[in-house]
Amino acid sequence: MNKKSSGQKLSTQASKIMRSNNSSQIQKSLAASVLSQRNTGKITGKAMETKASMVMNSNKYSGTTKSLAASVLSQSDKNR
């Protein structure tokens, strides 16, 4: 079980991203993961870990997208 959960501020931002027509698919995917980990004890799956890692290692994504990716990665399975 994951002892970390998404914070209120980032969860609010993720919710806005999910409702926005201007958000990219990658942002919505990461935002959905952030929201699914809000006070649930869930951990990030392997595929989402890979996606978030790709975002963090790229220069083409915004700070918002990288914040979402960082949250997703912080809640990943440390044994992988």
Image: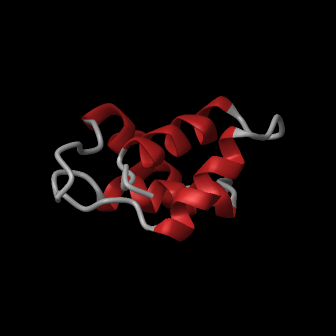
**Left of 11 or right of it: where is 22?**
right
Residue 24 x %, y %? 69, 57
Q: The N terminus lies in which quarter of the figure?
A: bottom left
| Relative to 72, residue 1 above or below | below
In percent of the image, x 31 and y 62: which residue is there? 36
Q: Quadrant of residue 9?
A: top left
Residue 42 x %, y %? 25, 62
In percent of the image, x 65 and y 54: which residue is there? 23
**Left of 77 or right of it: where is 24?**
right
Q: The C terminus lies in which quarter of the figure?
A: bottom left
Residue 3 x %, y %? 17, 45
In percent of the image, x 51 and y 43: which residue is there? 68
**Left of 3 or right of it: where is 68?**
right
Q: How is the image coloured?
A: secondary structure
Q: Quadrant of residue 69?
A: top right
| Relative to 8, residue 47 above or below | below
Residue 76 x %, y %? 39, 52
Q: Nearer the viewer, residue 80 or 39?
A: 80
